[in-house]
Amino acid sequence: MAAELLLFAPPSQTAARPPVRRQPVRSPCSPCVLAPLTAFAEAGTSAADALAYDIGRDHARHGITPPPEPLASSSALRRGYESGRAAFAGRTRAATPNVRLWLQLRLQAWLRGRSFETLCVTPNYLGQLEASHCPVTRQPLSQGRQLPPHGAPQDRVVSRLCDDAGYAAGHLAMLSLAADLAKADHGWEDAWAQADQLQRSGAAQADGLNAGAWRRLAVLMSFVTPLPHAQAAGLPLLVLPPNRVHLLNPVQGLQVLATQLLSRSGWSARLAQLLPLLPHDAARQAFHHFFLALLPRVIASGHPTDPLRRRWALEDAWRHTEVLQRWRKFALLLDALACQLLLERIAQRGLLPQRLQLHSSEQDTAGWELESRGYLGSSSLVEHAAALTLASRGAAAVQPAIPRTLRPLPVPQRRMAAQPQMHLPL
């Protein structure tokens, strides 16, 4: 599936968030990972139990038994599973691979005390994240049979690119287990510094990744990190954004569009249409110089016909210093607002094969739960009334109320069209 680019204006309130207290990477079934939920339950709320109950019941709804360790350690999860087995006996729903991944991800989020945005992160949505290769390691992905962090290095996992956010649409990507474990709770600057350290020391790898993989990981995380315009303009596009990843920095959105001019034939006609949209002659001249630096590097790859190799060729062209220098010279002639307006003009003209859709900034990080740094908090745990719960489940006795783990979106969710989309800020 072609990449779906989601471009948003950076939220002003995000930059002012306090420093994040990082959490160590541990097994999702260990007691220390369950501590946030234990403390939350001890605070006098049934929200943690309600989440576990629903996860157990949904496992039974699809005829799947939860992993033995969490099933044995959580009475709420076990009650939900047993209730579901009784309610759905003989009429379970199909357990497709995407449904299994969805249930695994919900269980993983609960075990880690993380919020899970259930309106958009559905089995259908997770199917749109599918990838044959890890964008960080570039190795083929395999189907794992264990909850992370257990499994083979090449097993596919759904990774949160922003460690300060819960499981929500916009910053989830399909990575290898090796890349996800290396990422841990690092920010993009940490990953970039790790690559610098490897180059200085001459070491081959750190935490299972080489210097090139660490740089790709850093750029990938920078997409979902609001950055000053000048800083974002100085980053090479060493990895194109995976499907459904939001780009919070307008200059990086413009960088992706400029690179994708060369993704298929007819680039000269598209370039001729793009240049008049630039705000002044200096910008047009600088962009032309940048494009002349990028073009021969892409041509040198030999025009691979395989979409994956063609994607890597576009990414590798950014490894050359001259390409980045000329891009930065062009990008600094604009500011973030100018880049955003240019993206809107490109959307209106339809210069790229993607269907471009203008988008308001209110939805840029909807459901990420940044206020609680991605952990379960009061804003993500609004309980339904007990009567509605009984009516929806048809239960004979009062069961834990169902918490909602997201803020309602301003517009109703719509299924993704077959044609790739690109969302831009209004």
Image (spheres, rainbow, N blue to C red):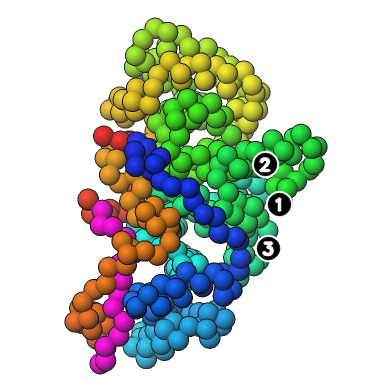
Is 417 in front, or is 18? 18
Secondary structure of the residue carrying tag 1 is loop
Q: CA distance from mark 2 to mark 1?
A: 10 Å
Q: Are marks 2 and 1 in contact (CB under 8 Å)?
A: yes
**Picture residue at 33% right of the left edge, 25% below the top:** 337
Q: Between disc 1 and disc 3, whose residue precedes? A: 3
Mark 2, residue position: 194
| Residue 203 x, y percent position in the rendering | 80, 41
Q: Tag 1: Cα neighbours inside 10 Å, few (<14), some, or many (≥20)?
A: few
Q: Is residue 130 visible?
A: no
Q: Position of residue 384 (x, y in %)?
A: 24, 73
Q: Magenta residues, as a range?
A: 396-409
- Which residue is located at x 36 percent, y 60 percent? 117
Q: CA distance from mark 1 to mark 3?
A: 14 Å
Q: CA distance from mark 3 to mark 2?
A: 23 Å
User: Which of label 3 and label 2 is nearer to you?
Assistant: 2
Near-viewer residue (285 or 235) = 235
To which residue does mark 3 refer?
A: 152
Q: Report helix, strand or loop for mark 2.
A: helix
- The residue where tag 1 is placed is 207
Amino acid beneath label 3: Ala
Label 2 crowd bin: few (<14), some (14–19), many (20+), radius 10 Å: many
- Quarter of the C terminus within the rendering: top left
Look at the numbered disc 3 and give the secondary structure of its residue: loop
